[in-house]
Image (spheres, rainbow, N blue to C red):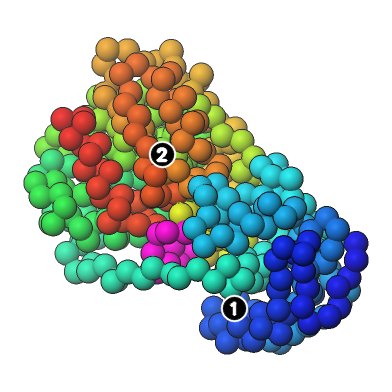
Amino acid sequence: MTDVGQEVAEFDMTFTIDRSSLLARLAADKEFASLALGADTIFALATPTATLVQIRVQDGKPRGGSGAEFTVVLDEDSWIALLANAPAPGSQHLLAHLSPRGAGEVLGDHLAFAQHLHLVRRTIEILAGRVEVEQTPPDLSRIEGRYLLVDVDGWGTCDIYVESTGSGRPIVFLHTAGADSTQFHGLLSLASSRFPGRRLISFDLPWHGRSSPARGRQVLDYELTSETYARCIAAVIAALELDEPPVLVGASMAGAAVVEVAARYPASIAAAIGCQVGPRVGSRHNAWLRNSKVNQALFVPEWTYGLMSPNSPKSDRDRVWWGYSQGGYGVYERDIVYYTTCWDIRNVAPMFSESTPPMVLMSGAFDYTVPPAATEELSQMIPGAIYHEMPDLGHFPHAENPAAFAEHLAWALTALD
C-alpha cells in the first residue's frame, strides 16, 4: 500500500482530502477533543491502491503522522456512499462497509482498531460534513419512578425499577440489550400530547440501569435466556396489577422478547409491537464486547451508534450513545448472546394459536443488522401479524427519534385496535 505523504491525498483521483483542513476541523471539534483524551494512536484511511490520509492522536490532539497502527480500507464506491450528505439506508456507518456486511477491511492491529473506533467514527463524520439536526430536550417532569419487588423463576427476588406517565389503557415498553428504560424518556414525555388515554410504562431488567442484580446473586452472575426473559416480563406485568393487559412494545432484543411473550404468556398482554427483529439474528457478537483490553464504555456505544438513522436528531442519538456507555460490565455481551443464540422463531412457532395476541412488526430502514426484509419475513411466519416499515428510522426507533417513532407507534396502535 502506497503511503501518500503530501498535504493533499486523493481518493483514486475522484475525491481529495486536504489533510491540513481535516486536522484543523478535528482540532476545533469539541466532540473529537473529548473522545481523544487519553488516546495515543496513529490510523490511516485508504483505498485498496492508496493511503488517503494518516492521523496521529496524542494527548488529545490530532496531527499528521506515519506508521499507522491500523488502516481502514474501503473501495471508492464505499467511500462515496459513506461520505454522502444523505447516505442511503444501510450505508451510513463504517461498520456497515466492513466484513461481514461489506467488502471493506481493517489492516494492521485489530485490537487498536477496536480501542479507537470512536476516533475513526468521528473523523469520518467530520469528513462527511453533514448538517446535524438538533432537538429540544424532553420534559421529564411528569414521569414517575418507583421500585417493585418481583420474584422471577430462575433469577430469584429482584428489585425492578419502573417509570410511568399518563393514565388509561397501558402500554409497557422494553429496553434494548445492555440499556435501560431511560431510552423511553423522550417518548414518555410525549404521552399527554400524542397518547391521551394511555398509560406509558417502562422498566429496567435486573442487572440493567437502576435495577440491581437479583438478590443473593453475584454481580457478574448474569445470563439471559428465552425462558428467564419471558418469565421476568410476565412477572413484572403481573406485579404492576394493571386494570387490563397491556400492549407490549420493544425493539431489537426486546423486539424478540415481545414475540416470545406473545407465544409463551399470551394471556399476560393484549397485543405486541416488535421492532427490528427477524426470524433469527447473527453477526452481532464479537470478541471485543467482553475484553479487558477494550474499554466497554467506548466500544459498546460505538458498536451500536451507527445502527441509527443519520437523519435522527444528533442530541437523541447522543443520548443513546451515552446510555450504552453506562452499562454494567458484561451485561450487553450476555444480552447479545441471547439475541444471537437463543432467539429463533422456530423455537416458539409451535406455540402460536388462536389465543396468541395480535401483533405488529415494524422495521427502521437504516438498520443494517436487521433490515426491513428480515422483519417482513418474520411477519409472514406469524399468523395474523401486520408488517410496517419506518423509512426514516434505524435500529433504536423509540430512542433515536421519539417524535418520529410516535407517529409509527400511533399507526400500530390504531391497526391493532
Residue 363, numbered label: 2
Q: Nearer the viewer, residue 396 or 183?
A: 396
Image location of residue 168, percent across then percent down: 10, 45
In this rendering, would 303 be left or right of 388?
Answer: right
Image location of residue 95, percent across then percent down: 64, 53
- In the rendered image, which quarter contains the C terminus? top left
In this rendering, would 346 be left or right of 69?
Answer: left
In this rendering, would 177 be left or right of 22?
Answer: left
Residue for point 40% across, 49% down: 393
Q: Is residue 185 visible?
A: yes
Q: Which residues are magenta?
A: 310-323
Residue that badge 1 annotates: 32
Q: Residues within 10 Å of mark 1 (few under 14, many from 20)?
A: many
Residue for point 32% across, 69% down: 135
Q: Is residue 6 above or below residue 2?
A: below
**Circle 2 SS class:** strand
Residue 162, numbered label: none
In this rendering, would 17 be left or right of 312?
Answer: right
Residue for point 59% across, 40% down: 337
The type of residue carrying mark 2 is Ser
Q: Is residue 35 above or below residue 404?
A: below
